[in-house]
Image (tube, rainbow, N blue to C red):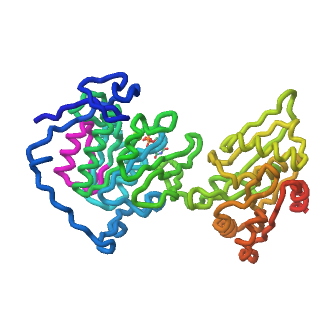
Amino acid sequence: MANKTQYICDQCNFHSPKWLGQCPSCNTWNSFVETVVEKPTKTSSLSRQATAKPMLRLKDIPSVEADRLKSHLSEFNRALGGGIVPGSVNLIGGEPGIGKSTLLMQVFAAIRAYPKLYITGEESLTQLKLRAGRLDIHDPDLLFVSATDIDSALQTMDELQPQLVIIDSIQSMQTQDLTSPAGSVAQVRECTQRLITNAKQNNVAVFLVGHVTKDGEIAGPKVLEHMVDAVFYLEGDSLHQFRILRSSKNRYGNLSEIGLFEMTEKGLQEHSALESLFVSNGLEKSPGAVRTITMEGSRPLLIELQALTVPSGFGYPKRTASGFNLNRLQLLIAVLIRRAGLKLYEQDVYANIVGGLKLDETALDLPMCLAVTGSLLDQAFPTDMVAIGEVSLSGMIRPIGQLEARISEAIKLGFKKALVPDAGYDKIKRYEQQIGLVPVRSLSNIKVWLQDLNS
Ligand code: TYD
Ligand code: MG
């Protein structure tokens, strides 16, 4: 018998045969979503004999580690927590044009699991072939199908029994069982549910592309995030070439891992010298540029902060930040004015993070204060030194998390000195042999440090 659809309130599960603007049960507006309701069959519910599932001891439950599908894309493996888990359903979200299809095409070719299938609902097969050509992908065993009907796609999957399936994108898929259009919450939810059921039954790894709306949500269906096993976002700046693959949910791995790529003519490349991405070229000293080590998840990353101060024309001084939190910049300027006596109230201040990264970390406070002060006093910060630390409203330098990881990264990159919070000094004292540590307590002496460091 054909499935019937009903409209169900998202909030309180109230069923209605027709769409309603407001739920008569919980009074929520616009909460009805079309859903397929299957008629209970004879074998189900009451007449069915329930059988208890076997219990397993913890040690007898198989581990997923051995079965993970890996590729030479080590940054991708890393972001996933070690590789793709068979039977897992993964969502890759990101803004249009960021490189989701490119990434998945590369992954598709790189994973040694056969057969595998790329289902495209958005682009034609000739467009896919063009992309494969650009990416230098010529494997004759790669299978592609152009489909927007999820049931026909599932049929193909049942016949082929693939190990890996890419769906580009979930918003382009639809089932005839629902009258709602493709991309609606109802369709996306139903299609994903059918894919999940298939993936779990046949132990096939599935990747879904999900478009993200302007306000950063996976279009319409935030619901998707709850259904799938892992959610990854491909982020970056369309003006810059780097891309970060970050997980926001992962049932099979660590959330804090990220994958870093660079978008090139030949697709996404893993970047071997990440340090060169986020610092400006050249080693000459320049006032207002300070290097620091930030943490992206559990990975330390060398970045450069820049500040420029210019006398304000008249009226209210202007503060502009690119990549850095503007409120934080204003707070730091206030602290510098009050606690270090800097005449920033008559200066416009521009702050920037090199490479187009957007960061929001309090460990950047101290380097940003040094950049602003350096620009104001025309004093350069040494290029072989990093600065790390949070600044409190009283002007004290506060300790920060993962200081050890940051310091070891600075040592690895060949930095000779590090300005660190006095309060965290004990934890890193043992690195004294490898890097000159300069513990600092309060911003009130910032002018003196800068002079001393330069002499
Ligand atoms: P695409 O993967 O189509 O983005 P999405 O699927 O997220 O919408 O890629 C978008 C951009 O990437 C496109 O503007 C072209 C660029 N690109 C490269 O720079 N190099 C390449 O090798 C490829 C295939 C694409
Ligand atoms: Mg695409």
The residue at 33%/71% (across/down) is 58
Residue 20: x and y, percent? 32, 22
Location of ligand 2 given as a quarter of the image: top left
- Can the viewer see residue 211? yes
The residue at 49%/51% (across/down) is 245
Task: For the N terminus, give its image quadrant.
Answer: top left
Look at the image and say whether residue 151 sits in the magenta stretch. Answer: yes
Residue 393: x and y, percent? 79, 49
Look at the image and say whether residue 287 sits in the magenta stretch. Answer: no
Task: For the C terminus, give its image quadrant.
Answer: bottom right
Q: How many marks?
A: 0
Front residue of 121 and 329: 329
Residue 147: x and y, percent? 26, 38
Left or right position of 115 against 169: left
Left or right position of 70 against 331: left
Q: In which quarter of the view is residue 381 placed?
A: bottom right
- The part of the chain drawn in magenta is 142-165
- Can the viewer see residue 176? no
